[in-house]
Amino acid sequence: MRLVLIVLLPFLGSLCAGFLPSNARNAEAWLSGFVAVACFALTLSLYPLVEDGGVVRMIVPWLPQYGLEFYLRVDGYSWLFATLVAFMGALVVLYARYYMSAADPVPRFFSFLLAFMGAMLGMVLSGNLIQLVLFWELTSLTSFMLIAYWYHLDDARRGARMASTVTGAGGLCLLAGVIVIGEIVGSYDLDRVLASGDLIRGNEWYPAILVLVALGALTKSAQFPFQFWLPNAMAAPTPVSAYLHSATMVKAGVFLLARLWPVLSGTDLWFAIIGGAGLCSLLLGAFAAIFQRDMKGVLAYSTISHLGLITLLLGMNSPLALVAAIFHMMNHATFKASLFMAAGIVDHETGTRDLQLLSGLSRAMPITATLAVVAAASMAGVPLLNGFISKEMFFAETIFAAHDPVLRIGLPAAATIAGMFSVAYSLRFIHQVFFGPVARDLPRTPHEPTRWMLVPSALLVSACLLVGSMPGTTVGPVLGTAAEAVLGASAMPEFSLALWHGFNMPFVMSLLALFGGVGLYIALYFHRRQAHGAAPFIDRFDGRRAFDVTMVTLIRAADRLTRWLYSRRLQTQLVLIVCIALVAAWVALDESSSFWGPEPVSRIDPGFALMWLVGAACAIGAALQAKYHRLAALIMVGGTGLVTCLTFAWFSAPDLALTQIAVEVVTLVLILLGLRWLPRRIEMDDPDRRTVRARARRARDLVLAVIVGAGMASLALAMMLRPRALGLAEFFIDRSLPEGGGRNVVNVILVDFRGFDTLGEITVVGIVALTVYALLRRFRPAPETMSVPRAQRLDGPRSLHALPDPDEKLPEGYLKIPAVIVRLLMPMAVIVSIFFLLRGHNSPGGGFVGGLVMATTVIAQYMISGTMWVESRSRLNPQYWLATGLIAAAVAGMGSWLTARTFLTAMSWDFHLPVIGELHVSSVLLFDLGVYMLVIGATVLMLVAIAHQSLRSHRKPHAVADATEVRVEAAAQSTGAPT
Amino acid sequence: MEIVFALAIGVLSGSGVWLLLRPRTFQVIMGLALLSYAINLFIFCMGRLKVGSPPIIHADLESNPALYADPVPQALVLTAIVISFATTALFLVVLLAARGLTGTDHVDGRERDT
């Protein structure tokens, strides 16, 4: 329970923080602080359980068959990291409360900060590797959000993009690596993976795993050659830099390397990749840090260098080096976070972080200066501070790491040189900012910040001092527990955290580094007073430029590929689709058996042939006329539809015939309503008519159309000449009556056997109807269609009084008799539609047909009597019908849960009622009722929405003007010929 | 019968594809309508042509599947008819909106530049 809370609390806090008002700085800080402290306390309380190599586990199974579960696991090592994350989180929240200005939108900041904390805690506490990668990516995501916090700044956006691209790509590599590990071990369970070290190292995929995991870890920890994102991430607010980019997130990479150390390490390849990357980062980072102008830049490069040190230690394949690595992870977090806080304070109080401008701040800010000096001394590895001890361990390890004679000398030498650089940049950092003459032209007059802003830094510095002076008693046991959790009790080396190991080689190296570093700084100081922010030699190998070039090249290549593969022209796309369909059909042909089936063709009925003669003529006619004579084309398509409908009826598909004819009517009305908004197209005006290219295009399309037609015809014939396989039909026909309780098999399939499909389908219909409705709310018709249609104009002035009178009993003129008829038909149509609905289960009919019949009769009222007349009388809210129908269908499905059966299982009850007799009631009737209501709602909603557009044109001012003009004209006519 | 049926499918799908490849939105919508008839008939004929034996189980006939038309393609086509009506409506509205916004009824939203 405690375990879940540790991970869950920050996410809950994040959610709450996001909803607080934007000026609630204190509330945000209290909330976040409470969460961080609670997590810290919860983590601390777990220590007794992990102290003696114990492991606390909590598993919630999710998809056990795929080895996926929510698995939290604490051992000594992850405990140490979780403590660090929670503790740092608490300090950073306190610091951020005073660092963030009142103008910043703090909810976003604290919300993402807490989300990051949850992700980081989840990452270190993951007991399942896939889950670990998931949280890993979450930390990248929150890091992106936090770097881009001031998203109005170009640098912030750019830095965030770079960081997320690099670490995100690394995360994907890690995922791939983890999946390979899971395939080899047969489980993603961390315990099982850790126990299978030999299996993995012996596998032929080991190099691939190593490279993939290393890519993930090295990108995350900003190691060579991916180090360039970290300095660019310094555009983030300083609390973020202190927390994410020095203390915790960048440690995720080395955390993982240490976590998987027992599995992956111990080979030369490991030493080459991990040790090599670490060594390069150690040297390059330290070297570049000397020449930075920005305070945070110095710290960023120094972070790269120190993480390089840790990576190198991990790469050395020695258990003692691993202990040193874990120790240095903690030490680096304490002194580097404290230095970031100092840099933030300087920035906050003076308005600049430029080392060229800053000088002599120790007089104005003595406490800040003292804290920074101690922390920087720890960074440089000055004795009596924690940085010294881990660095000493590092020096000792370099001496014994390699057997290769070059490395035997080279590694300690490189370590010493890196130590010298480290002393030099620490010295420069302190000396430039806090000592020397008092700077005059600072943007703000410096003074000490509020006390609370210093507290986090002070706590960290005192930790440096405590650990540095009494390492054995303060961190010794915890470090032992952590290292033992990684290595296992048997492989645990003896280590001693003493201040004084005697006058030995590492001590000599420390002294050399210390004095060499001071000398180096003095030499640089006199040699070039102005450091211009760029490191010599290595500046040319700018990772950031390489990144930009890579990105631009990638984007260009994608662009070119798109242009090559893709056309914006719909016609080209459709030609491609048709061609690909043809090729696919051709390839799929089975050449081994004969194409035509063995069955004989049946005798041709002349009536049927004649019917299709008309149908085909209609189809071809529609194809020819659709451009210039839309109405004619529409009528001919309708003719084809009727023939199709008759065909269904002919070949024993009464349900299809009914549905087809109802849909035919509704579609016709729909398109007729739409035609009004399409401007006239006159054949002679078309410029595109006679060019050679147009002819060629048409010829190509004709060939394609003929090929498709011939292909479809021969496929259909070939299929029909094969003997019928009963297959599914047998199943449905056999069970329709006993299990579905209905005689109409098609309807039983729709509402019972495949009810879930139908539910999905009516949902789609509902969505489409709502989309049509929504699209038409903002509909802007083409300007030339806005005038009152010709038919209405010719009808005379009466229909031009814009709106028909809703109180009229019957319309005047030619619509009078149709109006009488449709009103008389209405009740009958309603009865017919309900009849179709009710009998659908046993005879042709059903919800679809019934609904369409009902919708048609409603639409007929609209068409004949006019929108105003209908809507002033009835309140048919199609949206409600739609919603009720969907709910009814869903409820009918869920009803089966009451009897503990699966969704959409049909239930039926038989009653004996007096007078009426036996009554069979089934839940599928409710389902079909839902279909019925939804079809009514959707159809009416769509048609009415389009029909309503005609009202709109009456409201438009210029349409009114147009109408007036015509009215005057008509009036002139009527005076000319008085009745 | 089968030959007429197959020819009908061929003519409908040929006309449909021809219209589908035309530049005007109204032509495309008509083409889709014709093509959907063709496809519905095509799916329907997978159950073979059977006259006078709708898949409605007779009380006195035993439920011998060979005596009835295949209900599965029919069920598939029934939903296809309704869905194609819905998509036609959606396409029509998009067509109208595009006409209003772009000032042309070309499928690309602008005339082909020649």
Image: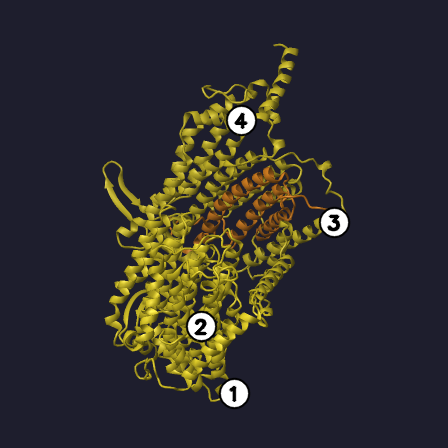
Chain colours: A yellow, B orange
Closer to the chain start, of discs 4 and 3, is: 3
Mark 4 vs mark 3, foreground winner is: 4
Separation of residues labelled 4 and 2 (CA atoms): 73 Å
According to the picture, the residue beneath numbered tag 2 turns out to be: A306
Specify whether disc 1 shares its chain with disc 2. yes
Asked whether residue A172 appears in the rendered view, the answer is: no
Instruction: Name the kind of residue labelled 3 in the image.
Output: Arg
Compared to A863, does A974 lie above or below? above
Q: Which quadrant of the figure contains the N terminus of chain A?
A: bottom left
Residue position marked by numbered label 4 in the rendering: A955
Tell me which label, 1 or 4, sits earlier in the chain: 1
Where, by quadrant of the figure, is residue A734 drawn?
Answer: bottom left
User: What residue is disc 3 on?
Assistant: A693
Q: Residue at x 34, y 53 (%)?
A: A29
Name the amino acid type tagged 1: Val
Secondary structure type for disc 4: helix
Q: Secondary structure at mark 2?
A: helix
Q: Calculate the distance from the C-alpha at mark 1 to the C-alpha at mark 2.
A: 23 Å
Q: Amino acid at mark 4?
A: Arg
Q: Is residue A274 above or below residue A823?
A: below
- Three-letter amino acid code at disc 2? His
Q: Give the residue number, with chain letter if any, for mark 1.
A: A406
Q: Are marks 3 and 2 on the same chain?
A: yes
Name the N-terminal-most of marks 4 and 2.
Answer: 2
**Chain letter for the residue marked with disc 2 in the picture:** A
Residue A82, image x and y in percent? Answer: 33, 67
Indicate the secondary structure of the residue bearing disc 1.
helix
